[in-house]
Image: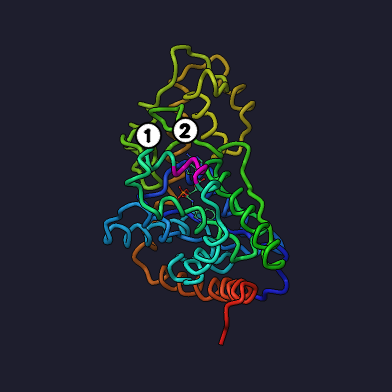
């Protein structure tokens, strides 16, 4: 890959905590596959293992989930010859950049991060410092690659704003080093809701497994979970997230997977009941995930995984190292 031909860079990351779910897939992962084809664009898709450490992880589990996620990247169609796929901890610049950016971050702006408030459940005395400063590490992830666009789900919007603020502040105080990144948030699917609680986003940390469908769920599990998905007491298939969050969520899932618009789906389901919607969606989800799961099984324990990781890390270290050197020089640190 020759750097000079790229005008844009895309960066995104996913935490290797549990298996990726439909929210991760429809809000982010699925779009990565399209973006790797974009012209004049180099893309970096990272498994952010350092982020996962902000809450206690079982080391063996973390190790396995990291490999699972890289296998998932390949299984959905990301191609190591088109995109750089790598693990965050293989690029030491991420940790270093996080410290440098910490020195320009403010307590006030960090305290306003809603994800910290949610995850620490209001008990800031016992919450980890890593959980608090995590958005700075994320800002570094993005800025190190001179990223112009960051495809994410809606829940990452506030973190992206912080990354932009830090980039602007650094550029103002130390000279023009960083590209200012733009979030890329899709209109449909940026916030997939929990199947059992459609007022809240689908989440890996949900208590019930009926909240989410993982990319590795069996057809039986998919059927069971979708059959149990919460709807409402009407029987009209209409997109109305405020009054009909469950049904609207199911329509959104079908829309992103099939590429049909929500209004096309509403027309298609006119006069039909929720049973019909669920039956069709079970088929759509199962058929979509089947080839992904087959490919996943083929590669999960193959050498392809480590080959991909080495290639990705080499290029990521090159690009991130260059930006880190510029940051250090601008801040007055001596380089040998
Ligand atoms: P994470 O691992 O929680 O989620 C990965 C991606 O999935 C999206 N997502 C959703 N989209 C739609 N509906 C949902 N219910 C849903 N749940 C999750 C997230 O928005 C995200 O795009 N902080 C990030 C990881 C990260 C990162 C980065 C992302 C670290 N560094 C740099 C972009 C750029 C996170 O915890 O995502």
Question: x and y percent of residue 257 in the render?
Answer: 54, 40
The span shown in magenta is 111-116
Q: Residue at x 45, y 60 (%)?
A: 47
Q: In this orientation, which residue lies closer to the viewer: 130 or 231?
A: 130
Judge whether residue 29 can be spotted in this image: no
Q: Label 2: which residue?
A: 193
Q: Residue at x 68, y 63 (%)?
A: 173
SS at mark 1 in the image: helix
Q: Label 1: which residue?
A: 211
Q: Earlier in the sequence, mark 1 or mark 2?
A: 2
Judge whether residue 103 can be spotted in this image: yes
Q: Is residue 91 above or below residue 187?
A: below
Disc sitting over residue 310 in the figure: none
The quadrant holding residue 211 is: top left
Q: Quadrant of the N terminus?
A: bottom right
Q: Is residue 114 magenta?
A: yes
Question: x and y percent of residue 45 in the render?
Answer: 53, 60
Magenta span: predominant SS is helix
Q: Residues within 10 Å of mark 1 (few under 14, many from 20)?
A: many
On screen, residue 201 versus residue 268, left or right, reads left
Q: Residues within 10 Å of mark 2 (few under 14, many from 20)?
A: many
């Amino acid at each position: 890959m020759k750097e000079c031909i790229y005008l844009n860079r895309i960066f995104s990351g996913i935490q290797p905590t549990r298996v990726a779910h439909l929210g991760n897939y429809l809000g982010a992962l699925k779009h990565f596959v399209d973006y790797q084809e974009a012209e004049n664009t180099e893309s970096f898709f990272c498994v952010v293992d350092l982020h996962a450490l902000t809450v206690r992880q079982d080391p063996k589990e973390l190790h396995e989930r990291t490999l699972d996620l890289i296998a998932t990247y390949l299984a959905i169609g990301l191609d190591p010859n088109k995109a750089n796929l790598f693990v965050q901890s293989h690029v030491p610049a991420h940790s270093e950049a996080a410290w440098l950016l910490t020195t320009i971050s403010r307590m006030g702006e960090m305290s306003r991060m809603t994800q910290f408030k949610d995850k620490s459940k209001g008990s800031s005395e016992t919450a980890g410092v890593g959980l608090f400063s995590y958005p700075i590490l994320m800002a570094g992830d993005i800025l190190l690659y001179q990223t112009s666009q960051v495809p994410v789900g809606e829940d990452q919007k506030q973190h992206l704003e912080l990354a932009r603020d830090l980039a602007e502040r650094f550029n103002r105080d130390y000279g023009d080093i960083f590209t200012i990144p733009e979030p890329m948030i899709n209109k449909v699917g940026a916030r997939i809701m929990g199947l059992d609680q459609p007022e809240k986003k689908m989440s890996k940390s949900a208590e019930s497994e009926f909240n989410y469908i993982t990319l590795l769920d069996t057809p039986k599990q998919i059927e069971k979970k979708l059959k149990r998905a919460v709807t409402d007491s009407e029987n009209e298939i209409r997109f109305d997230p405020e009054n009909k969050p469950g049904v609207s969520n199911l329509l959104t899932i079908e829309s992103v997977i099939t590429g049909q618009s929500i209004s096309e789906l509403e027309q298609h389901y006119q006069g039909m009941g929720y049973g019909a919607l669920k039956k069709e969606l079970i088929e759509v989800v199962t058929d979509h995930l089947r080839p992904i799961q087959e490919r996943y099984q083929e590669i999960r324990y193959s050498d392809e995984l480590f080959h991909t990781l080495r290639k990705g890390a080499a290029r990521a270290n090159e690009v991130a190292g260059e930006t880190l050197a510029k940051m250090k020089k601008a801040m007055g640190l001596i380089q040998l």
